[in-house]
Amino acid sequence: MNTTASLNQFWPDDPDVRDEVKQGLYGVVAWVAVGTALRVAVSKWAVVDALAQSLVGATVFGVVYGYMTYRRAD
């Protein structure tokens, strides 16, 4: 079974939408990476706690970004 082909069935067909999805995913990854690193470096948090907080923030970011992208498409 070709995993890439299987995952492509869930990927949007419109190239503009694909770009928006990629930007959102990159934003979420950056949020988690930077947020975790800053919390560990500056606040001396445990990595697990910092990662959990960053994931919560990334989820909120993803929801807001997704909603704004959806509204812009209307």
Image (cartoon, grey):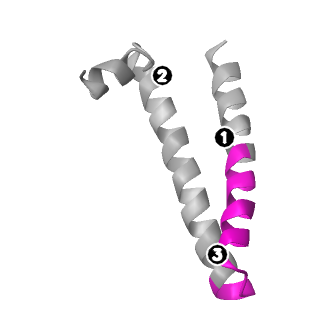
Rounded to the nearest angstrom, the CA distance separating label 3 from label 2 is 34 Å
Label 3 amino acid? Val
- Residue drawn at point x = 39 percent, y = 13 percent: 13
Determine which residue is flagged by label 2.
17
Rounded to the nearest angstrom, the CA distance separating label 2 from label 1 is 15 Å
User: Tag 3 or tag 1, which sits nearer the N-term?
Assistant: 3
Residue 46 x/y as whole percent: 70, 80
Mark nearest the camera among 1 and 3 is 3
Residue 16 x/y as whole percent: 43, 22
Question: Residue 31: which quarter of the image?
Answer: bottom right
Q: Nearer the viewer, residue 44 or 24?
A: 44
> For the stretch drawn in magenta, what is the main secondary structure?
helix
Magenta residue span: 41-59
Left or right: residue 55 versus residue 8 is: right
Label ID, residue 11: none
Q: Magenta includes 8?
A: no
Determine which residue is flagged by label 1.
62
